[in-house]
Image (spheres, rainbow, N blue to C red):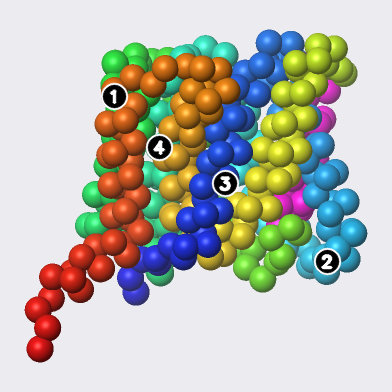
Amino acid sequence: MTSRDIPSRAWAELGLLSLIWGGSFLAIRTALDEIPVATSVAYRVGLAALVLWAYVLVRRLPLPRAPRIWGALLAMGLLNNVIPFSLMAWGQLHIETGLTSILNAGTAVFGVLAAALFLADESLTLRRAIGVGLGFFGVATAIGLENLANFDIRSMAQIAVVLGTMSYALAGVWARLRLQGLAPQVQAAGMLTGSSLVMIPVALWLDGPVVPQEASTILAVGYYAVIATAGAYLLYFRVLAMAGSGNTMLCTLMVAPVAILLGAVLRGEVLSPNVYAGFALLALGLALLDGRLLRRLRRGATPGP
């Protein structure tokens, strides 16, 4: 079977996810100025789980009853929340934001590779491989290629971020293999419940009870818990069902450029020429991954009868 194309609606929702998650870097880093990493993650998954369960109960969505499904949701919470949230939040304390964003974009690369290994309908074609490579290089160019020189394999923080991206990639595959048939809202609520069952005890054990006092911290926690987690995961599982796990990981390629644009719009930051070059490469990579533009060009080049 060939790799899956990305529907137009999925592209729109990928863009919205990128916009939401593009602001989460700033929100997480702001919160970490006052609260520890484990507590930050516990607030994120715990508050998001409460919001999503309220939504599920109001909508009266059917809940899974089989222990096998709840076990799969717990594993999804570990792969998609506990491991990457913790590793990447800790990494942000010790390495540059630009480098973190570049490494985070590697999720798309690992996602396509993991999907090709485990999912029959998401095979790795030459077009997809080139598209991912161009997209990743575009993100790196937009942020600044000089940041890549800062990568040091001996840096535990950088290794932590890379391991987090691998966990994200495996989570996409796990969801398609084990969580098919569940409503996206139930998938997200169940996953975050599993994450909360792990992170809340861990945070209390490591940090004790920590309540944020600064208004900026409270706003940051509210944003990344309610909007960038609860709301975003409703979109995430919808896109996953429409486009497949490898394609869903493309969102991480767009998060860093969105963050740069938000900085320009909201903070008046000036975009350098390398940012526009990076956007061009990223757009080309995404066009190759989508495939529709190439097909239209081929049809247009085919001589008529």
Q: Residue at (55%, 33%) from the top-left corner?
A: 22
Which tag, 4 or 2, sits closer to the chain's start? 2
Q: Earlier in the sequence, mark 1 or mark 4?
A: 4
Q: Earlier in the sequence, mark 3 or mark 2?
A: 3
Q: Any magenta on residue 191?
A: yes
The quadrant of the rendering that contains the N terminus is bottom left
Residue at the outermost bottom position: 305
Q: Residues within 10 Å of mark 4 (few under 14, many from 20)?
A: many
Which segment did they paint magenta? 187-207
Position of residue 90 measured from the top left corner of the image (x, y, whole percent): 59, 20
Judged from the image, the secondary structure of the residue bearing numbered disc 2 is: loop
CA gap between label 4 and label 2 equals 35 Å
Of the image marks 2 and 1, the number of the one nearer the N terminus: 2
Under mark 2, the amino acid is Leu
Q: Which is more toward the observer, 196 or 101?
A: 101
Main SS, magenta region, reads helix
| First reached walking from the N terminus: tag 1 or tag 3 | 3
Q: Amino acid at mark 4?
A: Gly
> Which residue is disc 2 drawn over?
61
Q: CA distance from mark 2 to mark 1?
A: 47 Å
Asked if residue 292 lies left or right of residue 218, the reply is left
- Between the C-alphas of marks 3 and 2, the distance is 24 Å
Res. 274 mark: 1
Q: Which residue is mark 3?
A: 16
Find residue 200 and report its horizontal and vertical position in percent.
81, 31
Residue 70 figure quarter: bottom right
Residue type at mark 1: give it: Asn
Q: What residue is drawn where x is 74% and y is 11%?
A: 34
Q: Residues within 10 Å of mark 2 (few under 14, many from 20)?
A: some
Which of marks 3 and 4 precedes in the sequence?
A: 3
Q: Amino acid at mark 3?
A: Leu
Contact? badges 4 and 2 (CB < 8 Å): no
